[in-house]
Image (tube, helix red, strand yellow):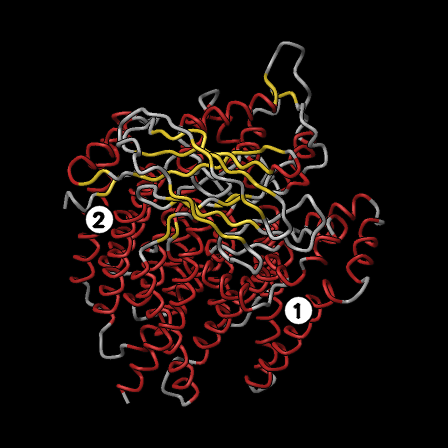
Amino acid sequence: MRLAAGIVLAALGLVLVLPVATVRVEQQADRRQMIANLGRGRVWEVIEVQAPWLTGLDLAVTSRNRPAPSAQVRVSEWPGGVERMRQLLPRRLPPPGAHEYTSFRFPALRDSEGRAYEVSIERLGPPPEGELVVWGRVSQAAIGRTDSAFAYRAWHRATGWNALARLGDRIAATPLGVAGVAGAAVLVLAYGAGLVRFLGLLRASPG
Amino acid sequence: MSASGRGLIVALLGLQLVRGLLYAFLIPLWQHPDEIGHFEYARLIADHRRTHLDLPLDGTVAYRVLVKLGHEDPPAGGGTSHAELRRAIIASLEHHRFWEIRPHLNPSDTFANNELRQPPLAYLGGGAILRALGPGSIERDLYALRIVDVLLSVVVVALACGLGRALFPGRPLLALAPAAFVTFLPQYSALAGSVTNDKPVEVVATGIAWLLVRTARRPSRLRDAMLAAGLVVVGLLTKLTALFLVPALLTVWDWRRARRAGARWWWYGATRLGVAVVLLWAFAWARLWLPGSARAVGTAIGGLPAGVERLVHGLGLGLHELLAGSLSEQVLYRVDYFPPTPTFLRRYFAVLFSGFWGNFGHMEAPLPILLYAALALASGAALVGLGRCALATRRGRGLAGWQADALVAMCLLAGWSFAVTFVRDGLVQSYSQGRHLFPVLVPMAVLFVVGLRWIVPRLDDRQFVTAMVLALALVDVLGLVLTVLPHFYGVSLLGAL
């Protein structure tokens, strides 16, 4: 009986978890995509950056049964008729911390209706320490528009004690300043002490 | 109440305060959902005598409220302007790494989520506080409003304590469990420190839930009905989604009336649920699939007098825009947008689930997947436990009749909150966030606790509450270390540990 109940629970858990797992992956894609409406003056675009270090960009271009010049670009669904291409970025990327700029261009992409698109990376550089920031532009050559601005940040995450130092720096950079660092430390300690106190009271309670 | 009981409640309230403040200061400014729009509204109210309304927002509730408050444009050269306020907010966004953390956003969409159409009560309160503080920086005002919301979240936990004691008299530790659940829920703590109009609605809805528990044990009085009506009005003046309280209260009244008349629960549930489902689905289908129906509704609404049209618009369903504004697109993409498709439902519930337990900032910092898995198992177990509890109660070995009645009321509150959210999301084609269910968080916490309690009957109440608090605290700490700090600060403390 208990085994059966355990199996049922595990199956139920899987059913509940699977959609979350899928959506987590899709959410990542969502973060990388900006969907806007050409009719309102912006471009539908999607850029996927291979993190943590950039090795390529995936761009999908498709159009549905809508009149030109609208087009839809989705990376999460990959509908039929999509021309998918992968263009490797130059292997020699600037190291973390370097203030180096580069630019390069993808060859034109065409969607299933023959409209051409250009993708170019305009700036590649890490202004904040430890982060690689990519700014880009998608132009839709077929209709002579150049519009804008995708960006994706690939964190070069600080780890270990450096992480604590960076966390302190970042909190100190808020309006709270050094008091913010001290305040955060006090709140963390108060949280721990409060939790211990609560559990202690719970233990001592007659129940 | 015993001294230890009082000590536990005080400790819990203190923990909610500390956790709310911790998240309020740890999550960078402007990184909570819609915080920009909520702050803008409160600041406009606070500065209404010194602000020149130079933006074309005459139709918004906010501008109408400002006029009611006696707004007059300041003399030339004096005061400031709404556009300048927005420029100052944008400067603050840049200063606080808003686009660095969310680089995929288009800066031109900064004020696209127009909160100025919301009812004014929360902003009148926030504006009064800002006015009392006097002129100051945007950052100071934002932190002040965040702290006010943390205090309101403490009120919610206090109400949860009262509700628990009313529902489980004689079991003080189990009575504390729903409040402990709310306190240690990571997403609730994170959002406790956000500038929003949600918190007053949470207070109102939790107050109504408490009232429903009390009236399950004794006959309702006129005073109860008046109190409930007053709370609903306060809720509606705060946020239109509080509308769910009206059908929820009516359904609870209907259920209790039917129960007194001896109706069988399954017949009652089947008839009411069946009618509701048929109506909802018929509406959804008719909206997009019946030729001409969408256009007809859109035209009808567009032809109403301006005041009524604004009322319809203001119901939060976006009907006017949806039906009259972009009909051709809707019809063209009806398959994509039709809510009850498997893809929509799968994503909908997954986004709702993650946003309920912990998906921080603008729903862009999810917990590790293994934590969701554990939470999903716990949720499933709670559902199974609720079923066991219901069966045992029917056989006379479970809860007392009035307790079961109170739990049904909690179910109805949660169900109506979800139904209204779901219909609204379907109409505006968005995915619901778990926080949209937080007005009924305490009823949901009660159901979760009762369900889990029936899964582990061998544990005593002390062991059960201790295990639940430790588990949630572990999820919270892991969420902080593995998600919040890496996402907002780009650091991983794991190496340091």
Label 2: how many residues lie within 10 Å, few (<14), some (14-19) or many (20+)? many
Q: Quadrant of the N terminus of chain B?
A: bottom left
Q: Name the amino acid, label 2.
A: Gly
Name the residue at 57% across, 81% down: B259
Name the residue at 48% across, 35% down: A120
Instruction: Give coordinates of residue B263: x percent, y percent.
Output: 59, 86
Pick out the residue farthest to the top.
Answer: B77
| Disc sitting over residue A194 in the figure | 2
Residue nearest the viewer, comparing B106 with B12: B106
Image-based side of B309 in relation to A63, left or right: right
Instruction: Give coordinates of residue B182: x percent, y percent.
Output: 36, 57
Instruction: Give coordinates of residue A144: x percent, y percent.
Output: 65, 33
Quadrant of the rendered image containing residue B395:
bottom left
Q: Is residue B103 above or below residue B227?
A: above
Image-based side of A173 in relation to B93, left or right: left
Q: Are marks 2 and 1 on the same chain?
A: no
Quadrant of the rendered image containing residue B64:
top right
| Disc sitting over residue B16 in the figure | none
Image-based side of B362 in relation to A168, left or right: right
Residue A180 in view, yes or no = no
Instruction: Give coordinates of residue B162: x percent, y percent.
Output: 39, 59
Name the residue at 44% across, 22% down: B137
Name the residue at 29% across, 31% down: A94
| Disc sitting over residue B280 in the figure | 1
Nearer to us of marks 2 and 1 is 1
Question: Subunit of mark 1?
Answer: B
Question: Subunit of mark 2?
Answer: A
Q: Name the amino acid, label 1.
A: Leu
